[in-house]
Image (cartoon, coloured by chain):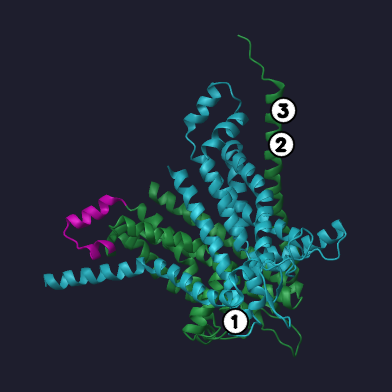
Amino acid sequence: MQKQSISAKRKAYITVMRVLMGISVSVTCALVLFLIGYVLWKGLPNVSWELLTTKPSYLSDRIGILPDILNTVYIVLATLALVLPLGVGAAIYLTEYAKNKKLVELIEYTAETLSGIPSIIYGLVGMLFFCQFFGMKTSLLAGAFTLVIMNLPTVMRTTQESLKTVPQSYREGAFGLGAGKWRVIYTVVFPGCIEGVITGCILSVGRILGESAALLFTAGFAHALNGIFEGLGSAGATLTVALYVYAKENGEFGIAFAIAAILMILTMFINLSAALVSRYFKKRRNV
Amino acid sequence: MKNRKRLMENAIHGIFLVLGLITVGCVLLITVYLVISGIPAIRKIGVLKFLFGKKWASTAAQPQYGILPFILTSIYGTAGAIVLGVPVGFLTAVYLSKIAPPKVKTVIETAVSLLAGIPSVVYGLVGMMVLVPGIRTLFHIPDGASLFAAIIVLAIMILPSIIKVSLTALEAVPKEYEDASLALGATPVETYFRVSVPAAKSGIAAAVVLGVGRAIGEAMAIMMVAGNAPNMPKVFQSVRFLTTAVASEMSYAADGSIQKQALFSIALVLFLFIMLINAVLNFFLKHSKE
């Protein structure tokens, strides 16, 4: 039997598609490499010990980003402390308690809606609700509350996913031994949340680090050096907001690139830990 | 004793119910706040004058509040980002799901997640320092901060979402479809584009809609590269998007002034756009599940 050759037209189609795919993949990879390379190359030389450990001072005419680093840490801690119980609770309600299908659909639809709302809208509503209505003024705490709403769907989703891996037979076993609903949740379901909580934490931290539009109007852009409780009550810029302010308002591009390089490294670190965590849990499940 | 236990179980059920309903509460809160704060200015200015007014001059002696330039800029900018970003993202996804060796796939997927994780201000900064001057010298225009720069930044920013969602859709295509096509004599590449892609079309459509949502909602990166002048959109002109219109005047608009109220009205318009996009996205996601 002779091997049938394909027509020139088909050959051309295949070649064109292959070339187009090649171009697209190269563009994507080149973009990533360029962005990482450019930001690190421009930013790292400007990162110094002094920059990381001091606050801006007009007297000695230098800029330090210690307050911004601390503000970022405070806001991450405050947001996680609030969003974890809420998100895990909501996920447990959905997977363990909810029987009404309509209600589950409504909750899941609203969660999806929340994750589609642009951060600038969160910023506005956070400003109106937390800063003005609740009288928190422009403060890190108001920013943290705004971020809680933004990250709620993420934590909910990751917890739900990890609860799905808890075998139904565990729950039935516990019920069969005479445990009440709460006891089953406490002993069987909670341990199953761990993966979701850790992944949710990592993703939320990544999102908080990258957030700027929602924080600009809720947390403000001061660079004062504060302790955590004092800090949460007063206005302050996170690293991302500081980058924006230094680049757009002050024209301090060296500082902006230094912050960008730090953020880039943190982003890589977060992605890496997310991958490691998911690999660890996958392995543990298979054993 | 039994009664107390039941009471406690019910109380705990109640607590979890409340936690479950938080997302519903948040969406209601956001909607109510945006409507309440967005309506007054629209009423004072007039719906038609607000939506279709071609001039925005909020600080002029005779202030004008027409947001048509912002609406059109957002639409053109998003459309441009989709036109540039979707083909690249889609073809990359086809390559990753069907052709790439596992190791290459892992590396590129990691790179794409990194792209998704980079803060938008970093995109803005690089756009400001590389793209804007580049456009200025390349096209010989006085200022590179323009709709064109914004489109390119947006196209890059939506790339990860498009790749990820199309990839998931393409990987869900049953192997039998492809095997059947190959057995009938189609080459692999023909099979991918004429069998796998049509089979995954709802998922790919969802990827595009998700990209639209991301692009239309982006604020800070655009703020740094688009120039922010309230012009009617032209490719090489400084423009203002719906998102940047809110962000750029919010910090100095006086509380209670019609200018500030108009900013909330812009946010309301943006919110309506997003809700519409969400509804479409849900439609496609449901279809792709079936």
Answer with left or right where residue B167 lies relative to residue A14.
left
Q: Which secondary structure, mark 3?
A: helix
Position in image of residue B178 (x %, y %): 52, 30
Chain identity of mark 2: A
Quadrant housing the N terminus of chain B = bottom left
Instruction: Give the Cα distance between marks 1 and 3.
Output: 59 Å
Q: Colour of chain B?
A: cyan
Chain identity of mark 1: A
Q: Residue at x 54, y 65 (%)?
A: B271
The foreground one among B127 and A59 is B127
Q: Which residue is mark 1?
A: A236
**Mark 3: few, some, or many residues within 10 Å (few <14, many ≥20)?**
few
In primary-sequence order, the first of circles 2 and 3 is 3
In primary-sequence order, the first of circles 2 and 1 is 2
Asked if the residue at tag 3 contacts the one at tag 2, i.e. Cβ–Cβ closer than 8 Å, the answer is no
Position in image of residue A166 (x %, y %): 33, 53
Q: Which residue is mark 3?
A: A12
Mark 2: amino acid: Val
Answer with left or right where residue A251 lies relative to residue A230.
right
The foreground one among B212 and B155 is B212
Magenta stretch? A167-185
- Residue B221 placement: quadrant: bottom right
**Magenta highlight on residue A170:** yes
Q: Which residue is mark 2?
A: A19
Q: Colour of chain A?
A: green
In primary-sequence order, the first of circles 1 and 3 is 3
Q: Which secondary structure, mark 1?
A: loop
